Image (cartoon, rainbow, N blue to C red):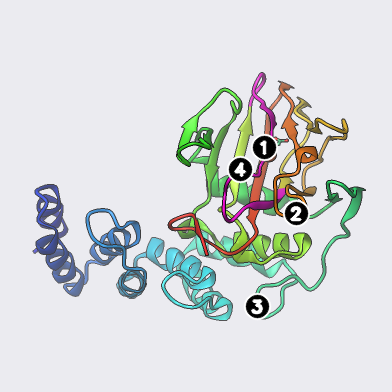
Amino acid sequence: MTRDDADALLARGQTEAAIAALTAAGRGGDGRAWFRLAILRLTGDRIARDLPGARAALAAARIAGDPDAALMEVALTANGTGAPRDWRGAVTLLEAAARRDRVAQAHLALLTAMDLDADGLPRRLPELRPLSTAPRIGIAHGFLTAAEGRHIVEAAAELLEPSMVVDPRTGRQVPHPIRTSRSAAIGPTRETLPIQAILRRIALLSDTGVEQGEPLTLLDYRPGQEYRPHHDAIPGLANQRIATVLLYLNQGYAGGATRFTRSGLTIEGRGGDALVFGNTLPDGRPDPDAEHAGLPVIEGHKLLATRWIRGAPIDPWTMGGS
Ligand SMILES: O=C(O)CCC(=O)C(=O)O
Ligand SMILES: [Fe+2]
């Protein structure tokens, strides 16, 4: 049995036979077959989602020498997919991968330049300067280094697609002229250790837990593109978006400031700045004063990463709250 046999079986809907074919090919030393099986188990596409099973298949693929599997295993080990979070275990896996793979080497170099404790938390945080108390808005200058900002852009750039918004009636993602940028969410399989270290930094800065954050989303605005006035809180959401962190990844464009429409507070973030703001009132309802916009970019190219943070942990695989 080969990987091609498995593809043919999958195309015909013979899932059990396809899994058997992939397992046989994997046992024969085909790392890519294990990787395929891991992806099937992760996506839950055609076979039931099985996160621990995906981890086992990824480990087998890594042992067979597959570098993509090794990096994905690092990501899932640190973010707790299919097993409890294990930062130290993830770093050990990354160090092993870096001996053979330049991409892993680059991730390790970025990570080593950060001042982290054994759980991936920063030892020091840049100061959060208050800009407003109601709603709570603050900015931390120099939150990201230039290399960290570039890493976020590289992790998401190939995934950029026209932005969608959540339809409040159906909860589905739909295209809408309110948001004309392109965007890409960095899902759990693509959360490199440098990105996960940044997510932990965001959690500390915003006084939230890392598991409350939706996947980090890159926004890419060209001239004329904007995010019209909106609330990040979604009416009726049980596990509400209580806060937002915006990471400004570059500068040198004209227009494109972030504006809080009620107060007029306008932020022209510089590359590396982090803006933190609350979206809800003390009773949990959306705060009308948190309405804000990404003004149209007039010239140049604006890159931003957004972390929408829920009131309670969220499962990135289902986007369901607990
Ligand atoms: O682009 C901006 O400045 C605002 C982005 C924003 O509001 C969001 O991502 O929710
Ligand atoms: Fe927003």
Q: Mark 3 or 4 closer to N-term?
A: 3
Q: CA distance from mark 1 to mark 4?
A: 24 Å
- Residue identified by numbered label 1: 303
Instruction: Say what secondary structure mark 2 lies in.
Output: loop
Residue 46 at what x, y percent from top left?
A: 22, 54
Q: Residue at x 75, y 34 (%)?
A: 292
Classify mark 4: helix, strand or loop: loop
State yes or no: discs 2 and 4 in contact (Cβ < 8 Å). no
Label 4 residue near ligand 2, CB within 8 Å: no
Q: Secondary structure at mark 3?
A: loop
Q: Is residue 164 above or below residue 119?
A: above
Query: In the rendered structure, which amino acid carries the disc numbered 3?
Result: Asp
233 in magenta: yes
Residue designated by label 2: 144
Image position of 27 (left or right of 134)? left
Q: Nearer the viewer, mark 3 or mark 4?
A: 4
Q: Which kind of residue does numbered mark 1 sit on?
A: Leu
Observer-side mark, 1 or 4, equals 4
Q: Are marks 1 and 4 in contact (CB under 8 Å)?
A: no
The residue beneath circle 4 is: 234
Q: Which numbered disc, 2 or 1, marks the residue that appears first in the sequence? A: 2
**Dot 4 surroundings within 10 Å: few (below 14), some, or many (20 or more)?**
some
